[in-house]
């Protein structure tokens, strides 16, 4: 009975729940972008800048936080991160000027950055080397991002941008719950994976490049898919929100499926498969001009963008077995958030050619991910305690 209670799966569910709340606020930003365009009358380029704001706050500190967490037991970092992610994103809809909104989203991104490295380190311990187990933790974040448009869209439709403040209390509550859990935990992260092999920095660098390319596609689709439905396919904002929800739901399914595939055929093959299948999925979406028939296609795009997610995180930690928090900070946070850095150029393209133009550019990127992932190699690095 004791073994069941302390199983990796049980501990993973705790961190997966916190991950869902934390990444809800990453999903809130693209869900709110159309409302900033409609209510504040900002351009597509400025709207993309809001995604950039959250990205800057999230991406830049990830590596340093990972190094810090690998060296010290700091149980307050992850709970603080969850709370800040919600406070910053929640305040964004209340603030009157673009610079203040930008700064609030930077604060939200910083909260996300504080959460991922310690959480990823704890999840690696709980997963006991299983890609399927890690996929549940990764899927927690995808579920949070998936729920964001489903909850944010009707709230903002009915109450306006100020409704973002409604989502602050759940973040603060989750931070408190996680802090209490950290204090109750008798085994600090010294029980986390230790030196099970040499770090392979070259392969990790290649993996990071693959993740940045994938992230650019993923963030780009979530940023422009609602606007694509409304401006190019002539749909309502509600149907545009549904398209975004389906894209994110596909990400959840793809993340869970990718973990199972990784355990069966190998991590590298799972990554390569996801990259290869993403290309025709994007092309099929762009070739369909019916706003209803395109809905299952955007779900398929979401599945393909999510397929390698947990596998890349697991593989990254295997490439850096001595620095699991740093690896998690890069793969969960820095590389994923780095995709947002490319949103302003895509916003300029969307201003000139519409959201469809931005999606056409994104459809070419899987080719580079396919080429880069060909250089990845499997590793037999194990998890030791």
Image (cartoon, rainbow, N blue to C red):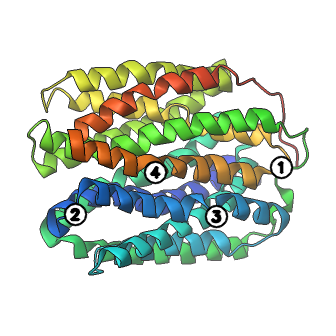
**Which tag is nearer the camera, tag 3 or tag 2?**
2
The reply, left or right, for residue 352 in relation to residue 112 is left
**Residues marked 3 and 2 touching at CB (< 8 Å):** no
Nearest to N terminus: mark 2 or mark 1 = 2
**Which tag is nearer the camera, tag 3 or tag 1?**
3
The residue drawn where x is 63% and y is 42% is 134
**Residues marked 2 and 1 touching at CB (< 8 Å):** no
Residue annotated with mark 3: 61
Q: Nearer the viewer, residue 367 or 170?
A: 367
Residue annotated with mark 2: 42
The residue drawn where x is 29% and y is 40% is 246
| Residue 329 position in % (x across, y down) | 66, 54
Q: Which mark is residue 340?
A: 4
| Residue 222 position in % (x across, y down) | 34, 45
Nearest to N terminus: mark 3 or mark 1 = 3
Residue annotated with mark 1: 193
**Residues marked 2 and 4 touching at CB (< 8 Å):** no
């Amino acid at each position: 009975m004791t073994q069941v209670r302390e199983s990796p799966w049980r501990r993973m569910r705790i961190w997966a729940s916190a991950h869902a709340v934390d990444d809800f606020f990453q999903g809130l930003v693209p869900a709110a972008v159309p409302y900033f365009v409609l209510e504040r009358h900002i351009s597509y380029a400025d709207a993309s800048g809001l995604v950039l704001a959250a990205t800057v706050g999230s991406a830049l500190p990830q590596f340093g936080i990972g190094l810090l967490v690998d060296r010290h037991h700091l149980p307050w970092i992850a709970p603080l991160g969850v709370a800040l992610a919600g406070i910053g994103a929640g305040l964004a809809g209340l603030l009157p000027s673009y610079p203040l909104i930008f700064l609030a989203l930077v604060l939200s991104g910083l909260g996300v950055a504080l959460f991922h490295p310690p959480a990823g380190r704890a999840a690696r311990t709980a997963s006991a080397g299983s890609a399927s187990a890690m996929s549940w933790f990764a899927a927690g974040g995808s579920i949070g991002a998936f729920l964001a448009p489903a909850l944010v869209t009707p709230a903002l439709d009915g109450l306006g941008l100020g409704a973002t403040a409604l989502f602050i209390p759940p973040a603060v509550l989750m931070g408190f719950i996680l802090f209490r859990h950290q204090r109750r935990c008798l085994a600090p992260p010294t029980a986390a994976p230790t030196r099970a092999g040499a770090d392979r920095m070259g392969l990790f660098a290649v993996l990071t490049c693959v993740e940045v390319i994938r992230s650019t596609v993923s963030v780009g689709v979530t940023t422009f898919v609602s606007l694509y439905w409304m401006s190019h396919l002539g749909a309502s904002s509600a149907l545009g929100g549904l398209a975004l929800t389906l894209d994110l739901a596909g990400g959840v399914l793809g993340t869970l499926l990718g973990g199972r595939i990784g355990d069966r055929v190998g991590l590298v093959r799972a990554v390569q498969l996801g990259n290869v299948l993403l290309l025709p999925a994007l092309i099929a979406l762009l070739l369909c001009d019916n706003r209803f028939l395109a809905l299952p296609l955007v779900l398929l795009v979401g599945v393909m963008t999510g397929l390698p997610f947990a596998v890349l995180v697991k593989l990254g930690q295997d490439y850096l077995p001595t620095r699991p928090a740093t690896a998690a900070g890069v793969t969960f946070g820095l590389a994923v958030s780095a995709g947002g850095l490319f949103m302003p150029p895509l916003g300029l393209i969307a201003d000139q050619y519409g959201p469809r133009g931005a999606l056409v550019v994104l459809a070419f990127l899987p080719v580079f991910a396919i080429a880069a992932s060909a250089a990845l190699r499997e590793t037999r690095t194990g998890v030791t305690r």
